[in-house]
Image: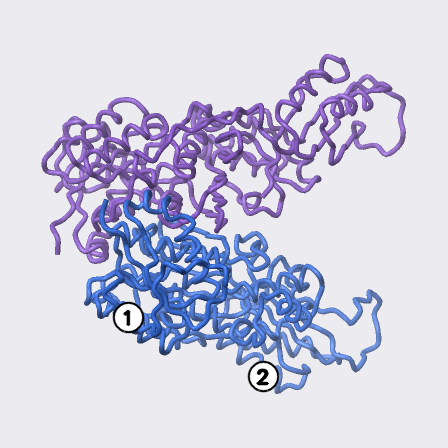
Chain colours: A blue, B purple
Amino acid sequence: MVDKLKVGLAGLGTVGSAVVRILQDKASQLAATVGRPVELVAFCAKDIRDGSLDLSAVRRVADPVALAADPGIDVLVELMGGEGDPAKSTVETALKSGKAVVTANKALIAAHGAALARLAEDNGVAFNFEAAVAGGIPVIKTMREGLLANRIDRVWGILNGTCNYILTRMFDEKLAFADCLKEAQRLGYAEADPTFDIDGFDTAHKLAILASLAFGTEVDKDAIYVEGIRQISLADLEMADELGYRVKLLGVAVRTEAGIEQRVHPTMVPKDAPLAQVGSVTNAVKIDGDKVSLTLIGPGAGGPATASAVVADLCDIARGNRVAPFGRPIALMAKPQRAPMQQHAGGYYIRLAAVDKPGTAATIARRMADEQISLESIVQRRRGHRAEPQEPCSVPAPVVLITYATSEDAVRRALAAIESDGVIVGAPQVIRIEQN
Amino acid sequence: MVDKLKVGLAGLGTVGSAVVRILQDKASQLAATVGRPVELVAFCAKDIRDGSLDLSAVRRVADPVALAADPGIDVLVELMGGEGDPAKSTVETALKSGKAVVTANKALIAAHGAALARLAEDNGVAFNFEAAVAGGIPVIKTMREGLLANRIDRVWGILNGTCNYILTRMFDEKLAFADCLKEAQRLGYAEADPTFDIDGFDTAHKLAILASLAFGTEVDKDAIYVEGIRQISLADLEMADELGYRVKLLGVAVRTEAGIEQRVHPTMVPKDAPLAQVGSVTNAVKIDGDKVSLTLIGPGAGGPATASAVVADLCDIARGNRVAPFGRPIALMAKPQRAPMQQHAGGYYIRLAAVDKPGTAATIARRMADEQISLESIVQRRRGHRAEPQEPCSVPAPVVLITYATSEDAVRRALAAIESDGVIVGAPQVIRIEQN
């Protein structure tokens, strides 16, 4: 049996504690499976969240950067989080010291993925981050190993459990967004400051990593168009249902003729698409390749699930199996050509609060036609769904349009014109449609 | 750059041809990604199905066993199929000659998996068979690498596209089994002799492999309880729908207190379970581990999808990344303790054709109670769904029972008693229920 793999762990929060438990509880099974012990020999933590952990045989190091340079470890596991220091300098130090690195830090990879991958390559060490995207779902291994015979044309998915929980619960229980968010916070599914999740930034970090893996381009987080779920109303979810769709916060990265399109926004997906059927906090990723289209569904967060991914990364290292961080040598990774969001092509759901006076519908329809936008359906309802004809009234009536494929640009121009015509009240609600 | 990986390919059917195309069309991309060329240097085939393949630069060898021993190749790809010779002797020869082997041959692995894995281990070479289970879905990599921190308690799935196509189409279009089978044959989704698919044997082969990976036990195909879909009627599918279920042919392997339970049979799954929603020829596997429950959905057959898996296996070998065939050393793999089917515990759907005379329902209910079987629901309908009370008539009326968890044994005894009571006509229809 080869020497044991000596692990140094920086960060003992929920995931770090779960990693310690797996390495300790399953020590003999893991050693037998991979052919050598995988042993936690040192750690570094500001606080130890789980007081019941037995760390008596593990050396505590005060500073994570010192731990990263410690000659007593072979691999550094970074679970502190955050794109800046100490996480960044800790990972850099470990790679420069010739140590393999495993991290769950999506912010770090999204911000510095290419540079860190280069450092790993230059030093001939593994740099694994399975846990950074979709928690317990082995999507990174799947993309860089399982599907490497494919040209990937699109990768998209439900990458944030908080948002999926809120959208699922709103629809199932007919709740308003704000009430649902409070409930999610009470249950611990949303942070006290929920911005990072519900405004789409968390999804964007993960999408940037998936896009890099899919297209062989450098991580390009700043190119992502990001829109969160704050503006989604129960009325939208119910109208979507009626029209045959579900609304999900998706991260979508697509190879287009104009370049790589990366976007995060509430999205209508046909009900029978696998992603439409994924509810609650569960995550899901669909990878559309030229040979295989694959959907992976599983837990996107939580200590044990995320730790499962961290330990799998460690076991690859223990087995001596190394794959380039983004699946190919750095020299092959190009700066991505960015496809501008204005050129996004697809169908749209548009909900307008139309002024109830003669000519409104004609005006809306004409503005759409002016931009060559074809409509698949128009649903106009008087308030209260009354079937009887009525006198015009001053309360605006919701008008919902579903367009055939058109461009973001055309939709924005048409809506600006409709607003300037004075036939609608308030801002139009726009939800993009993604076909399976 | 390391020397090229020299591939010898035995078998040029649909999958073999697709492998050749990927290796040729994507040669430079694959070489750059894995760091060395992966080149087809020799092949052996009775027939070349696809006449447009350019094999002019590839050496043809007459005999597959000679190809396996050929000093000019590093890895042998076996795509001939069948559990016996020439596939078996070809794979054995390659492994004994110190060559890595990639195969898509589920019958071979199901019959000789443990012995071949031992041969690979003894000779220190890779033995990969991703394509043998669920075609293009990388389920084997996921189990032996991605989820290796998990104790897996159940692996189950839709592993045969033909059966899933027939069951989906029967329900969607209200067709009888026989008509649907004919249609599947016409479309090329079913063989002229469909036995292997529709009687569950193909699913059993794949399940045996998954069970071995999940539980670390030797492949034990002969322990599998197998029941196909010939007896499923449209009435069953419609009644299942009414009760909140879909009917799928599943392979299910579960760790129970009595041992490893392996079974293939039509199964009712709750409509909101991921597997319930997988239609047509698509495959899906759910892996329930102690840290992560994961569902994988994708193409289970077809040349390009299956070839994608074969090429991924080749690329692992080209990268020098080797994992034990069943995820752990042979010394760790035990003979499985078999859980007898009679002890299977779960819910049951039972459809009886009840004689329409006083006391029938009471007799059925009493026989169930005698075996301590609790009923979740009983649906009894007069023929034609007439709402008016009628005189008893001589035509039997369908009675559908859904039981709470009980045992196979109890159900069989109760049904035998009911049959001997003479209150039903024909054989009872029994479909097991699997909870998500």
Q: Which chain is indicated by disc 1?
A: A
Where's residue B367, x and y in %? 75, 21
Q: Quadrant of residue B247?
A: top right
State which quarter of the image contains the C terminus of chain B.
top right
Q: Secondary structure at mark 1?
A: helix
- The residue singled out by tag 1 in the image is A116
- Residue flagged by tag 2: what amino acid is it? Ala
Q: CA distance from mark 2 to mark 1?
A: 47 Å
Q: Residues within 10 Å of mark 1 (few under 14, many from 20)?
A: many
Where's residue A277, x and y in %? 57, 54
Q: From what the image shows, is residue A31 above or below residue B179? A: below
Q: Are marks 2 and 1 in contact (CB under 8 Å)?
A: no
Where's residue B428, x and y in %? 67, 21
- Residue flagged by tag 1: what amino acid is it? Leu
Can residue A345 be seen by looking at this rendering?
yes
Q: Residue at x 55, y 28 (%)?
A: B229
Can residue A325 be seen by looking at this rendering?
no
Q: Earlier in the sequence, mark 2 or mark 1?
A: 1
Q: Residues within 10 Å of mark 2 (few under 14, many from 20)?
A: some
Q: Nearer the viewer, residue B79 or A208?
A: A208
- Respond whether the residues carrying marks 2 and 1 are from the same subunit: yes
- Horizontal side of B173 relative to A141 (left or right) equals right
Residue A417 is tagged as 2
Q: Residue at x 57, y 83 (%)?
A: A416
Q: Nearer the viewer, mark 2 or mark 1?
A: 1
Q: Nearer the viewer, residue A372 or B354?
A: B354
Q: Nearer the viewer, residue B331 or B226?
A: B331
Q: From what the image shows, is residue B203 above or below residue A23? A: above
